[in-house]
Amino acid sequence: EVQLVESGGGLIQPGGSLRLSCAASGFTVSSNYMSWVRQAPGKGLEWVSVIYSGGSTYYADSVKGRFTISRDNSKNTLYLQMNSLRAEDTAVYYCARGRYSLDYWGQGTLVTVSS
Amino acid sequence: DIVMTQTPLSLSVTPGQPASISCKSSQSLLHSDGKTYLYWYLQKPGQSPQLLIYEVSSRFSGVPDRFSGSGSGTDFTLKISRVEAEDVGVYYCMQGIHLPGTFGQGTKVEIK
């Protein structure tokens, strides 16, 4: 059974850093596109980043230069390193399998950026 | 970035009646490989989004056949032939032809 479990969210001050994790089971992360999508409170979905099976990475302009997507093949885990966090980064962050055809999603982890 | 525009933004439907959601993209979603990269997702209350339709009209595994997608180029439609109580939530279209992927604003479907 395919499962994605995010962790690492929490309350962080503006300018701070946080690393989100997404532990996968039932499939191999490194053989798939893997994405992060976020949802600000009461708002719609926003695509954040994707890592290709070959290792290429892409980011939304709103996070480029501040966020880094990566994976640990030995742990079958996806990560999102978030630096220089801003209030507007406050959202539930979902990891999902796929590039745009996001067929499995985690339950999400809430990141709140506030002083 | 490609802009995705959904209409209506909310819909109240009597159980058993049909429902239709429109999604228009600011650029054609037809790729040179012949595929059209348009997806539909449903986010039920309190849940993560789930994939309903990929590449305009293909239903994802387990999606009831009352859901259907159609369209081409820049105009797309999601139809529910007979709405059931479990279909409530927010429906999003998404384009995948150009990075960054972009979602529509969402259409909230409720039951009358």
Image (cartoon, coloured by chain):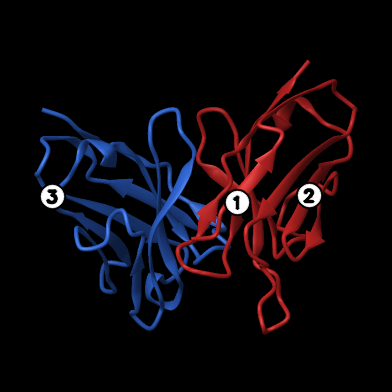
To the question of a shared chain for discs 3 and 2, the answer is no
Query: Dot 3 lies on which element?
Result: loop
Report which residue position mark 3 lands on.
A84
At 67% from the left and 83% from the top, the residue drawn is B32
- Residue B8 lies left or right of residue B64; in this view the side is left
Q: Position of residue B87 (x, y in %)?
A: 72, 32
Disc 3 to disc 2, how far (Cα)?
A: 39 Å
Q: Are marks 3 and 2 in contact (CB under 8 Å)?
A: no
At 16% from the left and 30% from the top, the residue drawn is A114
Q: Earlier in the sequence, mark 1 or mark 2?
A: 1
At 69% from the left and 52% from the top, the residue drawn is B24
Q: Quadrant of the C terminus of chain B?
A: top right
Disc 1 to disc 3, how far (Cα)?
A: 29 Å
* Chain B drawing hue: red
Disc 1 to disc 2, how far (Cα)?
A: 12 Å
To the question of a shared chain for discs 1 and 2, the answer is yes
Inspect the image, locate mark 1, and give the three-letter code of the amino acid beneath it: Met
Report which residue position mark 1 lands on.
B4
Q: Position of residue B37 (x, y in %)?
A: 65, 67
Tell me which corner region of the image, top left, top right, bottom left or bottom right, holds residue A55: bottom left
Inspect the image, locate mark 3, and give the three-letter code of the amino acid beneath it: Ser
Report which residue position mark 2 lands on.
B77
Q: The disc numbered 2 marks a residue on which chain? A: B
Q: Which chain is blue?
A: A
Q: In the rendering, which numbered label is found on residue A101? A: none
The single residue placed furthest to the front in the displayed view is B26
Categorize mark 2 by other alpha carbons within 10 Å: few (<14), some (14-19), many (20+).
many
